[in-house]
Image (cartoon, helix red, strand yellow):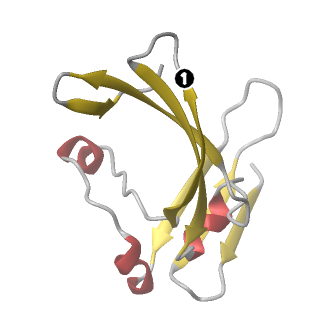
Amino acid sequence: MPSLMLLWGGEGIMYETGGALGKGERIFIIIRFTSKARPYFLPTSEDDKTADIQKVKLADEDLVEITGIKPGIDERSVTAELTTEYKNVTPFSVLTPINFKARPVHKAYFTLYDDGWRLEKKR
């Protein structure tokens, strides 16, 4: 079974991958954290602890601007388009294909109720 081990700049992450790249075969990644990784740890649920899962911070995503607000299907709903950017990118960002230099555009949906506008869950 092929294996690869990388020590990422000594910044608290070491990972190894193994497995075949054949169709239908599973690939696995084992990450061993060094003490320098601890500042990036996120809270871990009991279920995650049982499964030996540790979530880590990748970056902060901050609102840059609201680029537009469009009427919804009726006068009591609107869709807002907003642009964000990533800041405080951590060493763990190399483990994901996310382009942390991009400025993503998102949509947020609002509905007007008697007590004001409320953000709705994704549609």
Residue 78 spot, x, y in % from top left: 48, 26
Query: Could you say which is closer to the camera, residue 9 or residue 68?
Result: 68
Residue at (59, 89) in percent of width and height:
10
At x 57%, y 58%, the residue is 65
Q: Nearer the viewer, residue 113 or 25?
A: 113
Q: Is residue 34 above or below residue 56?
A: below
Question: Residue at position x 38%, y 85% from top?
Answer: 35
* Quadrant in which residue 111 is drawn: top left
Q: Is residue 98 left or right of residue 61?
A: right
Q: Residue at x 26, y 59 (%)?
A: 43
In this rendering, position of residue 79 left or right of residue 99:
left
On screen, residue 81 above or below 88:
above
Answer with the quarter of the image where residue 17 lies.
bottom right
Which residue reaches farthest front? 75
Residue 92 located left or right of residue 44 = right
Query: Residue 119 location, x and y as percent?
Result: 34, 33
Q: Disc 1 residue type?
A: Pro
Tell me the SS state at disc 1. Answer: strand
In the rendered image, residue 48, in percent from the top left (x then y), is placed at: 29, 46
Residue 62, percent across and down? 50, 63
Residue ranking furthest to the right: 22
Number of numbered callouts drawn: 1
Q: Is residue 78 left or right of residue 17?
A: left
Local packing at callout 1 (Cα closer than 10 Å; few below 14, some 14-19, many 20+) is few
Q: Which residue is mark 1?
A: 71
Picture layout, residue 65 above or below residue 75: below
Identify whether 92 is placed above or below 39.
above
Front position in the image: 112 or 6: 112
